[in-house]
Image (cartoon, coloured by chain):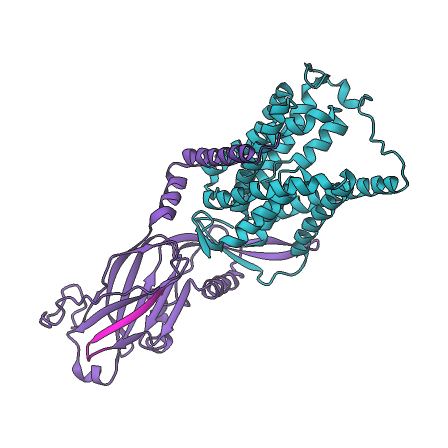
Chain colours: A cyan, B purple
């Protein structure tokens, strides 16, 4: 059963797209991540032009972050003030990112930069997570108590000016590193189509020392707005959001996520993190191989319409 | 599903063999073509279509016609766009687009049909001048191309890629005479046919010499939901983006209600 994607301008098997959406939804429910970093490479593997994959991936991130954020909002685990500072940085970053995206597309290096960025990001994050979870697993095997690094010690971040008090998070912190983090994630959102939760959450915990209970909700809060903004700007500037593809992905995604959450609750934290690390590394390695092996065709043709 | 193209033959026979004013004086031949429609709708299940074009030669020399000295070439040219060819090279172990060349206004699709191989119809020089056939199509580079030494390489790559992806096709033998002076030509619209105005061009050759040509426009339009979406994305991009976000918000919100556990 095929469906024609009007913006990607190609026919795809709807069952494969549903399967991808469900699988990524399942994993995102299981690990509590947005899934943008999985959906975009998967779409590229399935020959969706990277420009469309990135913009449509951001649209899927909006849907998957909303349901998570609503749950956190009900529990009161979102620091709106902190989220707003992050968001200001995020919107600026996304704007710069869109500009970088359009420029790379014009000079024909967009595919390369998207792939390289994914390889670097997934490789680094995957390795760090795997290392951390293996240590945790070995400790658990020896029945030692798992001690996370205590947030609370001060580092260089806490010596910066422009401090502001965030009541909900119970912290007193400069807005510079917060907006800066938001900015970096914003650039990643528009260039790579990821929400960026899997970088933001560790950065908020370890770098900014923000209490763990508000971290996930607050990052989801800002991801919704930054990725929604990215979708609108991508649609306006590059015409690359495929609404049909996005809709199929998000329907399958939200259903898959529900089953993922149930499976995730039966696994222990460090086991989950090790599995997620392996998955992240696998996607990174697959993209790296693609860059290194000689391509079947070294030429490519692009007309002034939709570029690849 | 094939599309049936109905025959529409103009009052070709009725026209007396008169000398056409615009044609060179020594050529009495006149060429006429007709297609059943000037618009083709692309639906979501479109997998390409064969288009039949009918035509007639008028004012011909019966002796030459009997000897098979008349040859016809019919081309369906897609809308023209500036097109860039990029080449990858290995840099520090990874494959990167390094060189590129942009050609000015080349057709997005091209389907050629002829009475026989066009290389045997007229000398290559003539075909180059008229730009008939993939090998003779003008490929003019835009911008700085250095000493031009890689021009051939990029042109060849362009032609090869367009032919392997099926958007450029040729069928030597696709034009058949159905009576002494009536012919039919079949050209193919590929599945990923571009939107816009295509042009059917027919050329008549007498014993290797070009004598007459005729062109007809053919509009290709996407229909239904696909068309509405494409139009919205390009004409109202801000509202389109807003709709995409709204769709995501509603989907996510509904999911949180339907699957609420707490």
Nearest the eye: B194 or A126: A126
**Res A194 quadrant in image:** top right
What's the magenta region? Answer: B178-188
* Residue drawn at the location 77% of the way across and 29% of the way down: A206
Relative vertical location of residue A97 with respect to residue B219 in this rendering, above or below: above
Relative vertical location of residue A254 with respect to residue A86 in this rendering, above or below: below
Nearest the eye: B169 or A155: A155
- Left of B1 or right of it: where is B158? right
**Residue A140 image offset from top left, x and y in percent:** 86, 40
**Residue A163 image offset from top left, x and y in percent:** 70, 15
**Res A264 quadrant in image:** top right
Residue A222 visible, this orientation: no
* Residue drawn at the location 27% of the way across and 69% of the way down: B203
Q: Main secondary structure of the magenta part?
A: strand
**Residue A78 image offset from top left, x and y in percent:** 64, 23
* Residue drawn at the location 9% of the way across and 71% of the way down: B16
Nearest the eye: A89 or B68: A89
Q: Is residue B186 magenta?
A: yes
Relative vertical location of residue B181 with respect to residue A69 in this rendering, above or below: below
């Amino acid at each position: 059963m095929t469906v024609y994607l009007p913006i990607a301008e190609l026919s795809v098997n709807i069952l494969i797209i549903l399967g991808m959406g469900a699988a990524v939804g399942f994993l995102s429910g299981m690990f509590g991540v947005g899934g943008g970093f999985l959906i975009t490479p998967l779409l590229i593997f399935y020959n969706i032009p990277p420009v469309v994959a990135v913009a449509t991936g951001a649209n899927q991130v909006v849907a998957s972050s909303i349901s998570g954020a609503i749950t956190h909002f009900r529990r009161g685990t979102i620091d709106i003030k902190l989220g707003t500072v992050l968001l200001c940085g995020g919107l600026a970053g996304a704007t710069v990112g869109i500009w970088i995206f359009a420029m790379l597309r014009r000079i024909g290096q967009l595919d390369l930069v998207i792939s390289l960025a994914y390889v670097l990001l997934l490789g680094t994050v995957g390795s760090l997570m795997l290392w951390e979870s293996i240590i945790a697993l070995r400790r658990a095997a020896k029945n030692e108590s798992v001690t996370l690094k205590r947030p609370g010690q001060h580092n260089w971040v806490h010596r910066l000016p422009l401090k502001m008090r965030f009541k909900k998070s119970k912290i007193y912190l400069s807005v510079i590193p917060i907006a800066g983090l938001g900015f970096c994630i914003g650039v990643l959102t528009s260039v790579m189509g990821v929400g960026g939760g899997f970088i933001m959450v560790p950065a908020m915990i370890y770098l900014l020392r923000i209490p763990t209970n508000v971290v996930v909700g607050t990052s989801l809060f800002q991801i919704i707005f930054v990725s929604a903004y990215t979708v609108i700007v991508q649609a306006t500037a590059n015409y690359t959001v495929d609404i049909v593809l996005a809709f199929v992905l998000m329907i399958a995604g939200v259903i898959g996520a529900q089953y993922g959450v149930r499976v995730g609750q039966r696994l222990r934290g460090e086991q989950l993190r090790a599995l997620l690390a392996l998955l992240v590394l696998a996607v990174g390695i697959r993209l790296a191989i693609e860059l290194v092996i000689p391509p079947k065709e070294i030429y490519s043709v692009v007309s002034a319409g939709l570029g690849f | 599903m094939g599309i049936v193209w109905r025959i529409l033959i103009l009052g070709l026979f009725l026209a007396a063999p008169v000398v056409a004013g615009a044609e060179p004086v020594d050529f009495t031949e006149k060429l006429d073509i007709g297609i059943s429609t000037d618009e083709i709708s692309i639906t979501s299940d479109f997998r390409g279509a064969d288009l039949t074009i009918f035509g007639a030669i008028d004012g011909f020399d019966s002796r030459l016609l009997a000897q098979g000295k008349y040859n016809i070439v019919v081309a369906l040219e897609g809308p023209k766009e500036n097109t860039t060819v990029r080449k990858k090279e290995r840099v520090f172990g990874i494959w990167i687009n390094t060189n590129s060349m942009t050609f000015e206004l080349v057709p997005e699709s091209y389907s050629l049909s002829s009475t026989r191989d066009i290389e045997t119809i007229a000398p290559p020089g003539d075909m180059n001048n008229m730009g008939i056939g993939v090998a003779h199509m003008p490929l003019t580079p835009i911008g700085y191309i250095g000493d031009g030494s890689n021009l051939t390489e990029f042109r060849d790559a362009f032609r090869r890629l367009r032919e392997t992806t099926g958007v450029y096709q040729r069928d030597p033998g696709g034009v058949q005479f159905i009576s002494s002076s009536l012919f039919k030509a079949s050209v193919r619209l590929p599945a990923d046919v571009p939107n816009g105005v295509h042009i059917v061009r027919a050329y008549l050759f007498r014993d290797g010499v070009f004598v007459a040509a005729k062109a007809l426009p053919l509009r290709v339009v996407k229909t239904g939901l696909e068309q509405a979406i494409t139009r919205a994305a390009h004409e109202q991009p801000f509202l389109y983006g807003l709709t995409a976000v709204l769709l995501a918000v509603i989907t996510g919100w509904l999911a949180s209600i339907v699957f609420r556990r707490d």
